[in-house]
Image: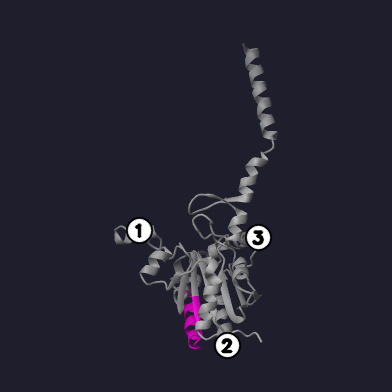
Amino acid sequence: MEQNIKSERSIISIIKKLRSLRKPSKRAVVPERLFRKCNGCGELISKGSMEEKLFTCPQCDYHFNIFARDRMDMLLDEYTVINGTARFIDPIDFPGYKAKYKENRKKSGLREGILTVAGHIEGIELVVVSLDNSFFMGSMGSYIGEEITRAFEYAGERNLPILIFSTSGGARMQEGIFSLMQMAKTSIAVDRYGQTKNLYISCMTHPTTGGVTASFASLGDIVLAEPGALIGFAGARVIKETIKGELPEGFQRAEFLRDKGFLDDIVHRGQMREYIYRLLKLHGYRSCRI
């Protein structure tokens, strides 16, 4: 009896070892590498077809998050990076912030969660800023507030239009009150830029929330959004608890906010380049091509 038990245990032990040595099936790896599940309809989409449609779902048109540099490549004929001297700022000596910052740099391949460029659309020169939510969820800290302010100054001094794509979780909590101060700083920059009589276009992408929504993102001369973008200040759960009531269907989505007059228009990513070009022409900007 004991001999049989020992024999069974020996067999089980051998089987476990063999299982641990077994290589994962290539069939299981391929879908994860070549396909992506859509957050909108749940369909499995080939990455090739998704990229062909500018990182939107070919089934339901869901707009995936994209890197700031990819957005510039889609929109502009050519561009030059400006204000790209990102530096680490830790004004309140937040525990673990520096290590987390380095981790985000390595993970995202970015120096900070923002990209500012001067470029052209069909020969019309403009400044374009894009937040990148792969870096601290695009949260606005002291450096990002400074770069946005400098972008407005750069555009104003050269009489150029400016376009900002927002995607953010709001103010960066690791910088405390200093991140909240960027709301006032960027809002003043917008006001000063407005005195130059140039055009500021703001485009909110998924998600745009917190202090970014409550400052420069809402202050554009023209305020756009991508389809289905989540836009708001506080989260829906916090609002429900505050008002002690139910929220309307589609609350804080771009389509709802457009219908309520908060947005001027919703523009599909595939039509963004042509749409921005037409806006610039309508506001008197002309090609600098000879």
Q: Magenta span has 154?
A: no
Label 1 to label 2: alpha-carbon separation = 44 Å
Amino acid type at image mark 1 = Glu
Residue 270 on image: x %, y %: 55, 66
Query: Do callouts 3 and 2 mark residues in contact (Cβ within 8 Å)?
Result: no
Q: Which disc number belongs to residue 157?
A: 2
Residue 214 on image: x %, y %: 43, 72
Q: Quadrant of the N terminus?
A: top right
Amino acid type at image mark 2 = Glu
Q: Residues within 10 Å of mark 1 (few under 14, many from 20)?
A: few
User: Start and end of the magenta stretch?
Assistant: 181-201
**Sequence-first disc among 1 and 2:** 2
The answer to whether residue 15 is seen in the rendering is: yes
Query: Do callouts 1 and 2 mark residues in contact (Cβ within 8 Å)?
Result: no
Relative side of 107 to 173, left or right: right
- Residue 213 figure quarter: bottom left
The residue carrying mark 1 is: 249
Q: Magenta span has 187?
A: yes
In the image, residue 243 sits, relative to residue 77, either above or below, namely: above
